[in-house]
């Protein structure tokens, strides 16, 4: 469970934004809106005919070469990516969380323009990267509305895997009166109006210490756009391909960490996202090394959960619930890929589980809406690891008092509606919001044919 109602505000996308983007040297932000127009527009298949979800990704050498690089080297081979080749200049960055201003060499990559398959009310970006000591990334977007006007350049994240050089952060107070950035999500302010996001470009700025030979490496960059309609109910589905399948995923409780590391939001309900992420990362056979865990108090059990919280923490949001930051953390492990997306139906989730791919789902509900939960939440992450023969959902729910009781079975109809709706009545009778099927997917670079097909069925490649 998250410690603030931020997701309620975000999913509804009703608040008007004020202010402007954080100050940043124009030398690193001067690429034109059409500067990356080379290459064909990518229009991946959507998860289902009724879905508005569109996933775009740049991950192959051809993808990277289709964009516009300035000071960038494109890597080929088993895992293509981009690195700093010859820096194009130096920029100063004033870190708002440390109070220090430092100069950094930089290079940029701008994606081709991508036209959303459905004009979109929201966009969430994802990236997979390695940032060795002395390096970091800025992820930005610019878009064109359906009325032909442009968004400003929006910062979607300032990110590094560690926290020694910069503090990983979202940027508040970004908006133009038509759209706003809510921590990690671009959202149209008035979804009852006609204006939507028609197309967009993503920009990466790779930074390193001046004179250094170190460089970030980015293997994957993409975004999910959607225009999920306002809905209190979604159609019920019958048990499908995942019925009777349960994956082996280690169970971790967030509540055993209550009071630990106040500087990373104090454990407990605030750590649902990193706890869920760590469960899925370890289900793929990856985990932190003993050396990486040396900073954790040796009296604490499950130190890897503390590690996940520290390395997903968003210093502006002041919490661990930044969706892309969790996905980016997962991708710091050897040959793991990650994406934040939306899923259209519970049947789509079953296809993933049947292929061996668990998922992390985001939902909100009051206690009486989900039998067996024993709590209510304005926003919570849990893992879907299987389905019973009758199609009920088997979840590793970190909102549990111990690891032994993390595994839960939730009624199918209740779970699918709670997860996939965008509006809900709260316990007081007022109207709150839901995420409309937001989930994290973590999967290895070496996939089986069945896993590739399952991912393709939900629009992921």
Image (spheres, helix red, strand yellow):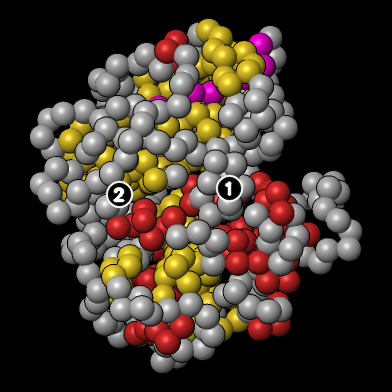
Pick out the residue farthest to the right.
Answer: 298
Instruction: Tell whether 290 sits left or right of 86.
Output: right
Using the numbered discs, state the Cα–Cα distance from disc 2 to disc 1 in whole angstroms. 20 Å
As drawn, 140 above or below 297: above
Q: Position of residue 411 (x, y in %)?
A: 42, 87
Dominant secondary structure, magenta: strand
Res. 406 visible in picture: yes
Above/below status of 428 relative to 185: below
Residue at left 40%, top 84%?
A: 369
Q: Quadrant of residue 428?
A: bottom left
Q: Secondary structure at mark 1?
A: loop
Name the quarter where the N terminus is drawn. Answer: bottom right
Instruction: Write down the region rendered in magenta.
Output: 203-210
Q: Name the residue tied to disc 1.
A: 318
Q: Which residue is mark 2?
A: 15
Q: What residue is drawn where x is 74% and y is 54%?
A: 261
Picture coordinates of residue 416, whole percent (x, y): 35, 77
Q: Are marks 2 and 1 in contact (CB under 8 Å)?
A: no
SS category of the residue bearing label 2: loop
């Amino acid at each position: 469970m998250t410690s603030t109602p931020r997701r309620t505000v975000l999913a509804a996308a009703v608040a008007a934004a004020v202010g402007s983007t954080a100050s940043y040297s124009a030398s690193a932000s001067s690429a034109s809106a059409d500067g990356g127009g080379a290459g064909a527009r990518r229009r991946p298949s959507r998860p289902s005919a009724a879905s508005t979800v569109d996933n775009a990704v740049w991950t192959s050498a051809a993808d990277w070469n289709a964009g516009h690089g300035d000071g960038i080297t494109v890597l080929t081979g088993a895992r293509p990516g981009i690195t700093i080749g010859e820096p194009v200049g130096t920029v100063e960055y004033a870190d708002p969380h440390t109070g220090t201003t430092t100069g950094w060499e930089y290079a940029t990559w701008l994606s081709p323009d991508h036209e959303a398959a459905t004009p979109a009310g929201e966009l969430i970006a994802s990236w997979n990267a390695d940032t060795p000591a002395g390096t970091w990334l800025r992820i930005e977007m610019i878009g064109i509305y359906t009325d032909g006007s442009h968004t400003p350049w929006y910062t979607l994240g300032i990110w590094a895997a560690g926290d020694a050089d910069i503090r990983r952060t979202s940027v508040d107070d970004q908006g133009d009166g038509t759209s706003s950035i809510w921590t990690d999500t671009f959202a149209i302010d008035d979804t009852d109006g006609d204006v939507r996001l028609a197309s967009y470009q993503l920009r990466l700025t790779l930074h390193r210490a001046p004179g250094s030979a170190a460089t970030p490496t980015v293997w994957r960059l993409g975004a999910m756009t959607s225009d999920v309609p306002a809905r209190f109910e979604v159609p019920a589905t019958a048990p499908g391909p995942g019925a009777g399948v349960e994956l082996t995923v280690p169970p971790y409780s967030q509540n055993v960490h209550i009071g630990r590391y106040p500087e990373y939001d104090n454990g407990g309900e605030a750590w649902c996202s990193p706890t869920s992420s760590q469960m899925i990362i370890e289900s793929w056979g990856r985990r932190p090394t003993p050396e990486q865990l040396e900073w954790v108090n040796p009296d604490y059990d499950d130190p890897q959960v503390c590690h996940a919280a520290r390395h997903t923490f968003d210093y502006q949001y002041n919490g661990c619930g930044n969706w892309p930051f969790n996905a980016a953390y997962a991708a710091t492990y050897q040959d793991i890929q990650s994406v934040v997306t939306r899923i259209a139906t519970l049947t789509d989730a079953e296809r993933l589980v049947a292929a061996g791919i668990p998922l992390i789902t985001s939902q909100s509900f009051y206690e009486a809406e989900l039998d067996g939960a024993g709590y209510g939440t304005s926003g919570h992450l849990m893992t879907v690891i299987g389905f019973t023969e009758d199609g009920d959902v088997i979840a590793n729910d970190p909102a549990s008092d111990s690891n032994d009781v993390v595994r839960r079975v939730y009624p199918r109809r209740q779970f699918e509606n709670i997860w996939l709706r965008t509006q809900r009545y709260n316990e007081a009778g007022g109207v709150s919001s839901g995420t409309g099927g937001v989930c994290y997917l973590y999967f290895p670079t070496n996939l089986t044919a069945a896993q590739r097909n399952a991912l393709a069925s939900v629009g992921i490649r």
